[in-house]
Image: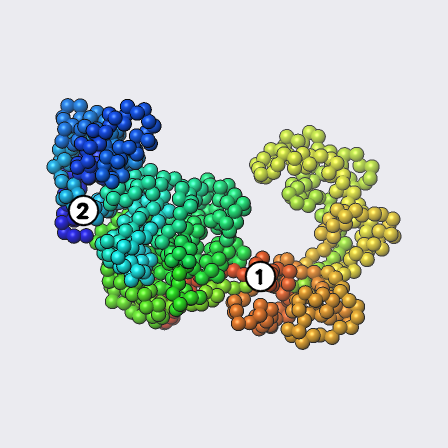
Amino acid sequence: MTQNTNNLAAYIWSLADLLRGDFKQSQYGRIILPFTLLRRLEGVLEDSKDAVLAQVEKVQAMNLPEEGQEKLLLRATGGLSFFNISKMNLSTLGESGIAANLEAYIQGFSKDAREIFEHFKFNEFIGQLNDANLLYKIVQKVRQTDLSPKAISNHDMGLVFEELIRRFAESSNETAGEHFTPRDIVRLTTSLVFMEDDEALTKPGIIRTIYDPTAGTGGFLSSGMEYVHELNPQAVMRGYGQELNPESYAICKADMLIKGQEVKNIKLGNTLSNDQLYADKFDYMLSNPPFGVDWKKIESDIKNENTLKGYEGRFGPGLPRVSDGSLLFLLHLISKLRDASEGGARIGIILNGSPLFTGGAGSGESEIRRYILEADLLEAIVALPTDMFYNTGISTYVWVLSNKKGAERKGKVQLINGVNLCSKMRKSLGSKRNVMDETDIATITRTFGIFAVVDARELDKPTEQKSNRGRQSANPKTEAPKTFASKLFNTYEFGYRRITIERPLRESYQFSDERIEECRFASGALNVLMKWVYNEYGASWSDEKDCEFYGSLMGQEIEIRAYVKSHFSDLKEKQIKDLLDHKIWLEQKQILLKAKQLQTAIGIAQHDDMNGFDEAIKAACQQQTITLDVKEKKQIKDAVSWKNPEAEKVIKKIHSRSSVPMPPRHTVHPEHKGKANPLYGLFTVAGEVIEYQADGDLRDNENVALDPSQSVNAINEAYFIKEVLPHVPDAWIDASKRDHKDQEIGIVGYEIPFNRHFYQYQPPRDLMEIDADLDAVSAEIMKLLQEVHS
């Protein structure tokens, strides 16, 4: 920005001197920006105003709809995209009735320009200014500022307006983060996206498009245009965007109008649920979507697109959890990439840390990362310093993606650790306490450009200023040096295969009085309540068959309902009715009585081999001449059995009774049932191939790194033999858990553990130093206590 444009912006912002006292500081921009726009539009229309006025009466006499009238009147503007049919201007509004005259003047603009003032809610501020007797003074000062194209070019006027937007952002920093991206972050992201195309952008007659789906006030669009203008003033950069917030949309649209852009390309609405540029593809895309904002309000729209359109829509790879929609914006941008056959496109998007690692293998987040990495779209991720944004101090990252990677970047991803490339601001703006200067930005862009590994090197940055309040340690902990580094990875290095490890179920059973007593009460939600009811009201109930009072709760219903309401408020009415129904109690009593009969036949001894349970039950039922349905048998089994690590393994299935030799490793495919393969749960025991029941409580998952140079089974088995078998020799790999895409064993997942790759180990303080500090503190405390007692 030149000194002249900076001075002009400062002069315009001096309107705030008139507003001070009558308006809040956060409202200054809402008045200054539309007045600046109004004066600029008036200057642009000055040469064509007479021609438009000459056509107004003719066009209005045709009784055409507004759209038709606008098309005819635009012909009289000499190529402009807007007009004004009012005979007034800022110089002729007068003092008496100025509010009504100004409102009428604004209504004279064509629809796109008029809409900007409507979204600024300019009429409301006109009324407030008039009530404060400030409107005439403001208008007089504004009209004395020459903002015509003869005095200031579109490009310079754009810079002035951007500076006004920046001042507005800083003056309203309590909500700035929702609508404004700090200039240093905008500059860095823009440079990363455009620098690879510097040579192409300097060619004569170049025409490119830039898009921001979360346009805000248009900072990214403006920065992209400015970057290209610096390289090639003759280049044409067409801006496109969509914004949800009406006020931000108005500012963005005004900025584009001032720059001579086609404002119809700026849309208002929710990009995810209503993409108003659905048919367009772009050359460059920049975005700073909201961090951690849920998409519950538009959940049905997103899920419908995912289900009905799949990969033909925007969200085919998967959906993240509803609590964070960041990755939806990334998928949206990917869908807007111009095809590689037409020159390709590049993306720069700012995300928090969550999209790097949230979600395990098979989750929506992991599948999205998988799609991006396997399609080789990700070029680089840059870690930014904390405290860089107005409304949050969390860790943030710039993702750079492209479908036109250079040969050296194919199959590679660059991670750049720039968390220490910043300086403290003299005065904080909301949560923004750090700023990146041109040197910091150049360090990152240069490293990205050379695409090379940079070993951690110490930066010439001041250390954190520690508080000197309280007692200071005699041996303070050494602070980690501030470093900068860059690393290169193959895309598959972020992938892994999650294999499921099973271990055999071991159970014992015993028909003791204590265990079969559990059959008296239903399982599930009613279990605890039935025990309470039995203890409170079952004293007179008998287990004899002819006990007519058993389970009858007449007269106690009110007390029971009160207890349920106070202790089990989430219990449903149907469950409460079941609790009070004596039939349920009688059914459970019958199960208990049958269990006691089985006890008579089986005895009360403990059995540590559950494989004999079914035979024992069958023999006992025949002896006692009773029958058990499936429900009864299950409840009795659940009551009398328990997991016991000392018991025998529970057999699920015997696959063959022929003697099968143990096969050498890797020679038997896991699907070959009937052949012994202990790695996949088929064990040879006494000449039989046995498959054991898995214990869900002992189930575990292991993440095995991807390696395209070997087969999936070879990698999985080698890992299992080295990392699992030495610790749990009876474990096996569950071959039924397969990836939905390649159908190989194990679910493929992707994560980018950025911090792990750049972690710097800091040895702990020496124990003697810590003891010395503790002794000193203890002595100081004792001294203070003695003073108190004395």
Q: In the displayed image of the protein, which residue is found farthest to the left?
A: 144
Asked whether the residues under the numbered discs 1 and 2 touch, taking CB atoms below 8 Å apart as contact, a structural biologist would say no
- Crowd rating for badge 1 (residues with CA inside 10 Å; few <14, some 14–19, many 20+): few
Residue situated in front as seen by the camera: 260 or 296: 260
The kind of residue tagged 2 is Ser
Q: Quadrant of residue 414?
A: bottom left
Question: What x and y, as percent, mark residue 701?
Answer: 57, 62
Which residue is denoted by mark 1 in the rendering? 742
Compared with 350, 122 (above or below) is above
* Quarter of the picture holding the C terminus: bottom left
Q: Nearer the viewer, mark 1 or mark 2?
A: 2
In this rendering, would 542 be left or right of 70? right
Residue situated in front as seen by the camera: 709 or 429: 709
Q: Quadrant of residue 184?
A: bottom left
Q: Which mark is residue 153?
A: 2
Question: What x and y, as percent, mark residue 450?
Answer: 32, 68
Q: Earlier in the sequence, mark 1 or mark 2?
A: 2
- Residue at the image point whose x is 29% and y is 65% from the top: 446
Question: What x and y, as percent, mark residue 389?
Answer: 31, 51
- Residue at the image point whose x is 29% and y is 39% from the top: 250
Question: What x and y, as percent, mark residue 265?
Answer: 34, 43
Residue situated in front as seen by the camera: 714 or 681: 714
